[in-house]
Image: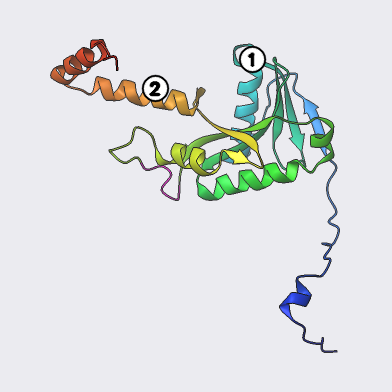
């Protein structure tokens, strides 16, 4: 049977309901210890365990009350801060334009879940180990930071009105945009000649002119 041709105007007025998709049971686990991973685990799985173990081990210093591990909920977990705010946690081994879009999609899908409705989040924190791909790992001489930091906060830090912050966790060291900027400034100062350091010190000590 051949369907009768119709106009685009008719087609875009149709009430379309996607077919139901069978989903695995959603699970939420409150961490009471570090996460272990099998020896044959893939790098992404190992990194996920590393992030959750870091959050659990450093709860007090990071201002975290509880750490939650999710299964079949799109995002990887959540943290409850001591101030009462709840943040979703998404983990990507590598970060670039594609992975940033994936993180945004997964967070938006999570917002539709029963878990998100029963325990609303105030935002999302996204962890990665390394910028790689789409030029995100590049750093022009005119800038202090890798392109990825600026690309994220230029185009991906707002997800449906929720703030999305990016954290790099690599070899046990946590880094945020502000921390990355400070570290870069320190490196730049250390690489200056003595003459340049003297000029910089003089400029910092110079009194500001009143209007």
- At x 64% / y 23%, what residue is drawn? 53
Q: Residue furthest bottom?
A: 1
Which residue in the protein does label 1 denote?
Answer: 63
Which corner quadrant of the image does residue 113 belong to?
top right
Give, as a single range, the part of the protein colored magenta.
133-138
Inspect this view and state whether residue 126 appears. Answer: no
Query: In this rendering, is residue 93 above or below 4?
Result: above
Residue closest to the eye, 44 or 26:
26
Q: Please tell me whether mark 2 sits on a helix, a strand or a loop.
A: helix
Q: Residue at x 61, y 28 (%)?
A: 51
Outermost residue, left side:
195
Give the total of numbered labels: 2
Q: Is residue 135 magenta?
A: yes
Q: Quadrant of the N terminus?
A: bottom right
Residue 112 spot, x, y in % from top left: 79, 44
The x, y position of residue 37, in whole percent, is: 66, 32
Question: How many residues crowd around disc 1 within 10 Å: few (fewer than 14), some, or many (20 or more)?
Answer: some
Residue 182 is marked as 2
């Amino acid at each position: 049977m051949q369907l009768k041709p119709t106009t685009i105007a008719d087609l875009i007025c149709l009430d379309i309901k996607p077919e139901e998709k069978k989903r695995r049971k959603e699970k939420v686990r409150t961490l009471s210890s570090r996460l272990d991973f099998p020896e044959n685990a893939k790098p992404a799985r190992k990194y996920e365990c590393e992030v959750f173990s870091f959050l659990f081990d450093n709860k007090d210093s990071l201002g975290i009350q509880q750490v939650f591990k999710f299964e079949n909920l799109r995002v990887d977990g959540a943290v409850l801060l001591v101030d009462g705010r709840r943040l979703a946690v998404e983990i990507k081994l590598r970060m670039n334009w594609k992975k940033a879009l994936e993180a945004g999609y997964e967070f938006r899908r999570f917002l539709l879940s029963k878990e998100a409705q029963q325990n609303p989040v105030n935002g999302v924190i996204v962890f990665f180990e390394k910028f790689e791909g789409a030029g995100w790992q590049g750093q022009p001489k005119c800038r202090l930071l890798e392109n990825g930091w600026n690309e994220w906060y230029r185009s991906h830090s707002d997800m449906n009105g929720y703030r999305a912050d990016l954290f790099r966790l690599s070899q046990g060291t946590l880094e945020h945009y502000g921390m990355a900027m400070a570290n870069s400034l320190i490196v730049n100062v250390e690489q200056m000649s003595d003459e340049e350091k003297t000029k910089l010190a003089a400029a910092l000590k110079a009194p500001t002119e009143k209007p």
